[in-house]
Image (spheres, grey):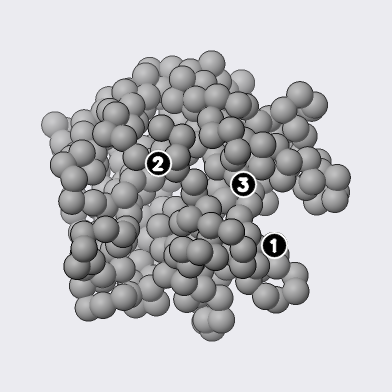
Amino acid sequence: MLSYRHAFHAGNHADVLKHIVLIQLLRYLGQKETPYMYIDTHSGAGVYALDTGYANKSREYETGIARLWDSKDLPGPVAEYVQLVRDMNPSGKMRYYPGSPYCADHVAREQDRIRLFELHPADIKLLEDNFRKREAEGQRSTTGTTRGKRVMVNRGDGFTGLKALLPPPSRRGLVLIDPPYEVKDDYRRVKDTLADALTRFPTGTYAVWYPVLQRMESRQLPDKLKRLQGKDWLNVSLSIGGPTPDGFGLTGSGMFVINPPWTLEPMLREIMPFLVKALARDDQARFTLETGAPVTGPGMRKA
């Protein structure tokens, strides 16, 4: 399925949660001098215009980044995320929103490596063009598909392309798995891809974004991921309100992290109440946060 375009959803409440978690995971990896590799299996276009095209039509960013744009006294991790978006908008007007690849490129150091996959023919072209433009402007020493080694854009299926990159040479890395979930098979492929990746690179950190929907596959995914290997995990979800009357529209999402850094849970306990209050659409807004080892082992606890 190649109909999904993330531009419709750019900057919404799900992006807020995903990108805050992503930035903090990369910041943790960056504390050691040894380089790491960031792999994004479903990269999208990299940058999204909020004042034109799909994003302006859907205006989903009004449920997310727009609610934080003028906020004062933001918690540290939230303030860092908002500042990253502001850095893309030096005029002070909210016109552009960074996708996961740009968030990663902003945080990564010169010695780190970024590997991006995208299958959609329109988005892969935009992704390549956006990184070429970024290199030409001298914002970072990034590279395109065929030049250099720091950032490489791959036209293909990230589920299958991931295998060839694991384990990374430095044995340090973060994998973001963020498919559109337009088809039920995406849920199965997430689980199967993670199971395979953990055999190749068991010490890596893996972050899976997923929608919180009524469909069975969505409800079951976190529990299935908890049973993978013998790894620690963290599961956080954010819902900005109850289901819409027509049953359509995304009101909640989650991030499931395997091998999370010890700093992630206390950070989320600090900021999630703030995000619920700041992004709430109604009084059914809430968050969940749970951590543990596989459900067959000791140590599971739930908040």
Determine if residue 36 is in view: no
Q: Please report the residue visible at 43 percent of the width from the left and 17 percent of the height from the top.
A: 200
Query: How many residues crowd mark 3 within 10 Å: few (<14), some (14–19), many (20+)?
Result: many
Please indicate whether residue 60 sits to the left or right of residue 130 in the image.
left
- The x, y position of residue 177, in whole percent, is 43, 37
- SS for dot 2: loop
Q: Which residue is mark 2?
A: 180
- SS for dot 3: loop
Quadrant occupied by the N terminus: top left
Residue 265 figure quarter: bottom left
Q: Please report the residue visible at 69 percent of the width from the left and 62 percent of the height from the top.
A: 88
- The x, y position of residue 206, in whole percent, is 42, 36
On residue 46, the disc is: 3
> Which kind of residue does numbered mark 3 sit on?
Gly
Please indicate whether residue 3 sits to the left or right of residue 105 in the image.
left
Count of numbered tags: 3
Query: How many residues crowd mark 2 within 10 Å: few (<14), some (14–19), many (20+)?
Result: some
Q: Which residue is mark 1?
A: 88
